[in-house]
Amino acid sequence: MVGLSLGEKQFIHGGIAQDLRTDGRKRLHYRPISIETGVIPQANGSARVRLGATDVIVSIKAELGKPSSLQPDKGKVSIFVDCSPTAAPMFEGRGGEELSSELSVALQRCLLGGKSGAGAGIDPSSLVIVEGKVCWDLYIDGLVVSSDGNLLDALGAAIKVALSNTGIPKVTVILGPSPNDQPDVDLSDEEFLQFDTTGVPVIVTLTKVGRHYIADATLEEESQMSSAMSVSLNRHGHICGLTKRGAAGLDPSVVLDMISVAQHVGEQLMSMLDSEIAAAEAAATQEQ
C-alpha cells in the first residue's frame, strides 16, 4: 500500500478534477514510454518497456507441441507474470504471488479472448503446423522489474513489442505414409519467420478517481481509485478483451463511455508503440 497524508490525497483528487495531475499530465495522457528489443538472446523474442518509473520485461519462447484434441486447429499460448520482490515492498511474500496471478489472468482475458479463442488478439490458429498433429506452443513470460502503477498496460505493450521481435524457425514437414502417423518436422537454423503482430492489441486501463477517470495511473493515483477498467483494442478499435478491478461498481452508461474513451486513447498508444518499434528496428539494423 502507498501511505499518503490527507493533504496528499486531496492534492491528487484536486489535480485530477482540474485536469492537471501531480506530474503535470492531463487526465488521458501517458507518461514517456521507451522500449528495447532483443534483451534476452536465448528467447525467440523479447522486449523491455519503461512507462515512467514502471519497468517490465517480456520474453517469448516458441516450442513444438501437439494441439488439444478439443481444438485441433489451434496452437497454444500461455502467459505468466512474475513480480520481482525488489520491484516494490508489497511484492514481498504472498503479495507478489497474488499480484502475479492477477496480472497473468488479466492478460489472458485481454489478449486470448474466450475459451473458444473468439476475439483473441493473438490468433492461436496461426500457430498450427499440421492440424491435430503439430503446433507451436507459445510461452509468454513477463517480469515486473519496477512498479509505479499501470502494470497491465506496460505488460501488454511489452508483449506486443516482444512479439514484433519474435522469429519462429521455418518448418519443413514430412508426412508419413498413413494419415495416423505423426509427421516428421525439421526446423531451420537459418531461416526464421517474423510473428505477425497486425492483430495484437494494446491494453488501455482507465482508473476512476473521484468522478473522473485517468489513463496510465501512477501507484499513488491507483491508491485513490474506486475502480479501474482495462480494455484491449486492436488497431481498428475493435475490443479484444475487457477486465475490471476494484470494489466499486460501474454504471453501464459509464462503462460505455469508458470504452469510447479507451478507443481514443488506444489509437494514441498504438501510434506511440509503432514509432518506438520502428525506431528500435532501425537501430538494430544499423548495429548489424
Image (cartoon, rainbow, N blue to C red):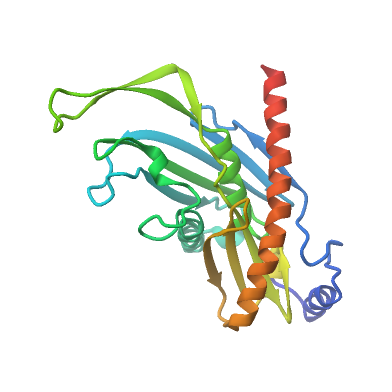
| Residue 100 visible to the viewer | yes
Q: Where residue 240 appears, x then y in whole percent?
A: 52, 58
Q: Where residue 275 appears, x then y in whole percent?
A: 73, 40
> For residue 101, what is the image quadrant?
bottom left
**Residue 191 versus residue 102 in the image, above or below:** above
**Residue 181 versus residue 203 in the image, above or below:** above
Q: Residue at x 57, y 39 (%)?
A: 162
> For residue 134, what is the image quadrant?
top left
Q: Where residue 38 appears, x then y in whole percent?
A: 59, 30
Q: Where residue 70 appears, x then y in whole percent?
A: 24, 52
91 relative to 270 in the view: left or right: left
| Residue 53 visible to the viewer | no
**Figure disc tally:** 0
Q: Where, quadrant-wise, is the C terminus in this rendering?
A: top right
Q: Where, quadrant-wise, is the N terminus in this rendering?
A: bottom right
Q: Residue at x 68, y 21 (%)?
A: 285
Q: Residue at x 68, y 40 (%)?
A: 35
